[in-house]
Image (tube, grey):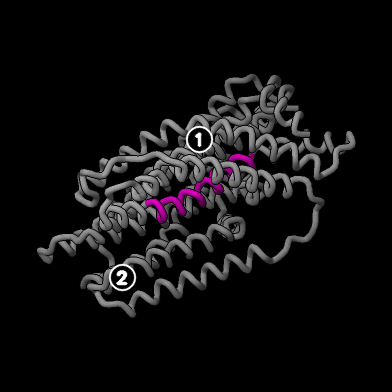
């Protein structure tokens, strides 16, 4: 099966582009930040610089590991779902579920190895760029030189391979197992995240306005709340759709298509919720903190500068990964519907009506993700603002939220509509024949 996996990758490389891109970006980010561990361990590095570099590498490296897993898992889940007929044919030909799992995991590992190899040079350059940022902000001494050693290289390769293999195993396990009643583990985990998030945001009121750790409880609380909502994404989407009664052919059809595909669209909605909540909450709280420090006339300490740098870097990484995940998932999911679009046109729908239906679907997904992501973000922003200032909602929130919403809408609507428009260039009869 491993030989078959390598042949599968070689014969159809286009199918694995999304996985390769996710693995490449993940490995590059992990290598860049973990090179700061190598730099901190170099000779002649002072304690303050070493502490700054180690903290940045540990915090962002941890986020990077999770994001690599989710990004690769998102791409592989769509890939495996689209190959359901192929996997079923292999099973009918005598392949066991274990053999199919080895084949898919082997494909993912092969692609991850290529992605990790391609990421070495960008990881090296990214690590140098990060060190220059720390030099310019005065957080790290100018005498500290960048080092790209075994920690960066080994961690980048190992994390990428483990994330790819684990994500592939979980994706193919869901695709090959028989229809069985779903366990309640996901639901229990979701409610546990919601409870932990609520405890986190409410604990903000136990801190003083000048406490250095004031931002931690509401930030992590908002993240946990968004994770809880993300785990409940299919239920939330179905609940929203059950309360909608859109008029018009495109709106009517869009609601019903989304109801049927709610489980498959959970990954897209999850990305939107996490992106909105983490970006809006972190950027708003950091902006308010900077404004309060500036208003007080104080100078930021090294620890405050480190926290600001980490917050902005984490949000930047999340934006890049979520955009990649959304584009990959939406492109693959929309391309997979080529036969469906052809059938709709043969049934009498015009290309404009098909495009309008997809646009309404993307709009509903975007609004649902923004709504629950915003709710999670506000749950953390409001307590932080009340404790840190005299207001309830900071002035910076609306501007930041508008920018976050614009990015989410542009990526979701743009990818869906442009991909659908491309699919509609194929004649309806040819689309049905090719996809059959």
Q: Which residue is mark 2?
A: 214
Magenta stretch: give its range: 57-78
Q: Main secondary structure of the magenta part?
A: helix
At a point 75% along the width and 33% down the height, the residue shown is 2
Which quadrant of the figure contains the C terminus?
top right
Q: Check if residue 325 falls in the magenta segment.
A: no
x and y percentages locating residue 252 in the rendered image:
60, 45
Q: Is residue 247 above or below residue 289?
A: above
Quarter of the rendering containing residue 336? top right
Q: Tell which tag, 2 or 1, sits nearer the viewer.
A: 1
Q: Is residue 324 above or below residue 375?
A: above
Determine which of the numbered discs, if any, sits on residue 24 in the image: 1
Position of 377 compared to 92: left or right? left
Which of marks 1 and 2 precedes in the sequence? 1
Q: Secondary structure at mark 1?
A: helix
x and y percentages locating residue 127 in the rendered image:
36, 40
Q: CA distance from mark 2 to mark 1?
A: 35 Å
At a point 52% along the width and 45% down the height, the residue shown is 68
Which quadrant of the figure contains the N terminus?
top right
């Amino acid at each position: 099966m491993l030989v078959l996996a390598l042949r599968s990758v070689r014969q159809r490389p286009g199918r694995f582009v999304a996985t390769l891109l996710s693995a490449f970006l993940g490995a590059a980010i992990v290598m860049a930040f973990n090179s700061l561990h190598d730099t901190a361990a170099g000779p002649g590095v002072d304690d303050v610089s070493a502490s700054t570099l180690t903290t940045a590498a540990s915090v962002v490296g941890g986020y990077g590991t999770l994001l690599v897993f989710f990004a690769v898992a998102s791409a592989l889940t769509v890939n495996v779902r689209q190959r359901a007929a192929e996997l079923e044919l292999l099973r009918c030909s005598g392949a066991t579920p274990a053999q199919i799992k080895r084949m898919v995991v082997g494909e993912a590992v092969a692609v991850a190895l290529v992605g990790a190899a391609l990421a070495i040079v960008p990881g090296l350059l990214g690590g140098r760029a990060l060190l220059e940022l720390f030099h310019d902000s005065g957080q790290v001494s100018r005498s500290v030189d960048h080092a790209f050693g075994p920690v960066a290289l080994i961690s980048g390769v190992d994390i990428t391979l483990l994330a790819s293999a684990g994500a592939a195993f979980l994706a193919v396990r869901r695709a090959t197992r028989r229809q069985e009643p779903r366990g309640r583990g996901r639901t229990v985990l979701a409610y546990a995240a919601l409870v932990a998030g609520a405890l986190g945001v409410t604990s903000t009121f136990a801190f003083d306005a000048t406490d250095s750790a004031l931002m931690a409880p509401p930030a992590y609380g908002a993240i946990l709340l968004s994770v809880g909502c993300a785990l409940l994404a299919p239920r939330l989407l179905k609940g929203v759709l059950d309360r909608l009664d859109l008029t018009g052919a495109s709106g009517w059809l869009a609601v019903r298509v989304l109801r049927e595909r709610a489980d498959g669209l959970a990954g897209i909605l999850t990305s939107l919720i996490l992106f909105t909540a983490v970006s809006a909450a972190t950027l708003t709280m950091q902006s308010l903190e900077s404004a309060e420090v500036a208003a007080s006339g104080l100078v930021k300490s090294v620890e405050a500068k480190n926290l600001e740098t980490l917050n902005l870097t984490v949000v930047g990484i999340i934006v890049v990964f979520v955009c990649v995940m959304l584009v990959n998932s939406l492109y693959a999911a929309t391309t997979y519907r080529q036969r469906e679009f052809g059938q709709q046109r043969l049934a009498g729908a015009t290309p404009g009506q098909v495009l309008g239906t997809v646009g309404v679907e993307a709009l509903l997904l975007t609004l649902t993700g923004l709504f629950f992501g915003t709710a999670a973000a506000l749950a953390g922003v409001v307590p932080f603002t009340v404790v840190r200032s005299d207001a309830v909602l900071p002035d910076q929130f609306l501007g930041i939220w508008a920018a976050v919403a614009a990015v989410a809408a542009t990526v979701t609507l743009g990818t869906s509509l442009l991909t659908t428009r491309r699919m509609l260039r194929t004649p309806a009869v040819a689309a049905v024949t090719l996809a059959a």
